[in-house]
Each structure stands twice: as structure tokens, then as C-alpha cells.
Amino acid sequence: MSNASLVTVFVLTGLPGAPGLDTPLFAIFLVIYVLTVLGNLLILLVITLDSHLHTPMYYFLTNLSFIDMWFSTVTVPKMLLTLASPGGGAISFPSCVAQLYSFHFLGSTECFLYTVMSYDRYLAITYPLRYTSLMTGRACVLLAASTWLSGALHSAVQTTLTFRLPFCGPNRIQHYFCDAPPILKLACADTSTNEMVIFVNIGVVAVGCFFLIALSYVSIVGSVLRIRTSEGRRRAFQTCASHCIVVLCFFLPCVFIYLRPGSKDPVDGVVAVFYTVLTPLLNPVVYTLRNKEVKNALLKLKSRAGPVAQ
């Protein structure tokens, strides 16, 4: 980070749109945020309390729910402050650094985690008899730890590249949170190298993860089609459909925003809402409404709580 930086406070302009929409947008995003936190907390609680869900798939799902809860918390509360008051968009330089690091840390960790989850489904469907010996508790911990460590290192690169530049001019960030592309516009130096390195860095991670996920699902589809019973094929496809939905909702907006060198479109802020606000809510909805085991665990939890409440 450069000592020549003169900017001590940035101002987040928020979502592009008419000021008259601030109040309804505040209400909508507040409801979504509360539902996101409560939904992911409920998944964590259900999986922790139900021993039938102590399997590798649900172990990775607890990691995903934990990430989603904090991923939303990194951006949405500040966006709500920006919508609620004219001065709500002010953010100090250190807070902006922390927000950018946390955002990319959690986002890239989730990207790696989706890849691990697809690998887990690949082993479960392609090698059902060897699955428990391949995906042991130790293997699960190592895979999860590797996603968190990779995310931390990836984010450190993004944050260092962004804030090593001097900031001495305008301080208005055309976004609702501190992200690299809009911040680079404010630097008092040539940012072409930074933009290209960030493009390559995020491109390698996103494309690499997406390629591995697609490869896993090509193998999964081949294995599913070899299942003799239609009921078996239906259950296998249903298990993987949830994962595919959230993966697409996460990766497509990321590709649109980051894999365009020099992107400065205000529409990026609107597209970012999909993976910063909606995807963290979508995960608990998809995994509970489409998953019979989680629904059964929720019913058992409700029946336990019933007598206590009485």
C-alpha cells in the first residue's frame, strides 16, 4: 500500500438508479439480508444437530452456508446504510481495504468450494462403493482447509495489487462496495498492468474452477445414464441439480464483471447484486426445498421444539 495515498475516505455511490427508489430498495434488500442470515443459520443448526447429516456432502454445505452468511454481511449492511442516508456511503480507507479483502477472500473461497463439492458428488455417484473410503473425514478437512487457504492467498494478491497504487484525486467509488475495478479508476497512476493482472488472476481461478466443475458433471451424467432404474437416475440428477443452479448463478455474473478488461460500466453494480445478495439467499432455499434429507431434518427439529414450546 502506497504511503503517497492522500485519500483517507472514499464515498460509495451505491446502486445506479433513481433516488426515489432508495426506500423500496432498502426494504427489499433488508428483508433479503435477514432471510439470508436466518436461512444459512438454520442450515448450520440442522446439520449440526442431525447425526444423519454428518456426511461429506453436508460438511461442505456447512462451509458454504457459513461463507454465504458472511459474504452477504460484507457488502449488504453498507449498501443499506448508503440507501438509508446521503452520508451513508462514506467509508474510510482502511475499511475499504478490509472490505475488498474480505469480499475476495470469501468469494474466491466459495468458488473453490463449489469445485470441491462437484468433486464430492462425482465420487459419490461414480464410485458409490468406494466413496466412504475415498472421502474420509481427514480428506474432507484437508479439502475444506485448502479452499480457505487458497481464497486467503488469492484475495491477498487482489488487495495488494489494488491498494499499492497512489490515490490523490476523486474519491467517489461508482459501486455499492469496495471492489477492484471501480477503485482502480480513482488511482493517480497507470492501472493497465493492474487491470491485466487482476483479469488474468480472476480469469484463471474462475475459468479453471468452472472447467473442473463441468468436467465433474460430464462424468456424473455418464454415470447417471448407466443407472438401470429410472428412480435411481431421477434421484441422482436431483441431487446434482441444486449444485448446478447455484454454480451458474454465482459464476455467470462474475464472468460478466471481471473477465472484461477495463470494465467501467455502472451496470456492473446491478449485476453484482446477483452473486452478492441473491446467491447467498438462493443456497439455503435451493438446498432445503429440493433436498428431502434436509426437509426431514427440519421436520424432526420442529417436532423436538414443539413439546419444549408447550
Image (cartoon, rainbow, N blue to C red):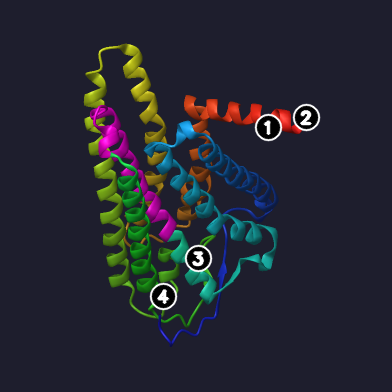
Instruction: Name the residue that disc number 4 marks.
Output: 163
As shown in the figure, which amino acid type bears the numbered disc 4?
Phe
- The residue shown at (53%, 48%) is 277
- The residue shown at (46%, 60%) is 103
Label ID, residue 305:
1
Disc with the residue nearer the chain's start (2 vs 3): 3
- Measured Cα–Cα span from mark 2 to mark 4: 56 Å
Q: Nearer the viewer, mark 4 or mark 3?
A: 3
- The residue shown at (28%, 48%) is 209
Camera-side residue: 71 or 298? 298
As shown in the figure, which amino acid type bears the numbered disc 2?
Gln
Label ID, residue 99:
3
Label 2 packing within 10 angstroms: few (<14), some (14-19), many (20+): few
Q: Are marks 3 and 1 in contact (CB under 8 Å)?
A: no
Disc with the residue nearer the chain's start (2 vs 4): 4
Q: Which residues are magenta?
A: 105-134
Disc with the residue nearer the chain's start (4 vs 3): 3
**Which x, y percent locates residue 118?**
31, 39
Label 4 packing within 10 angstroms: few (<14), some (14-19), many (20+): many
Q: Are marks 2 and 4 in contact (CB under 8 Å)?
A: no
Helix, strand or loop status at disc 1: helix
For this orientation, the residue located farthest to the right is 310
Pick the quarter of the image with the N terminus: bottom left
Q: Nearer the viewer, mark 1 or mark 4?
A: 1
As shown in the figure, which amino acid type bears the numbered disc 3?
Gln
- On screen, residue 211 versus residue 144, left or right, reads left
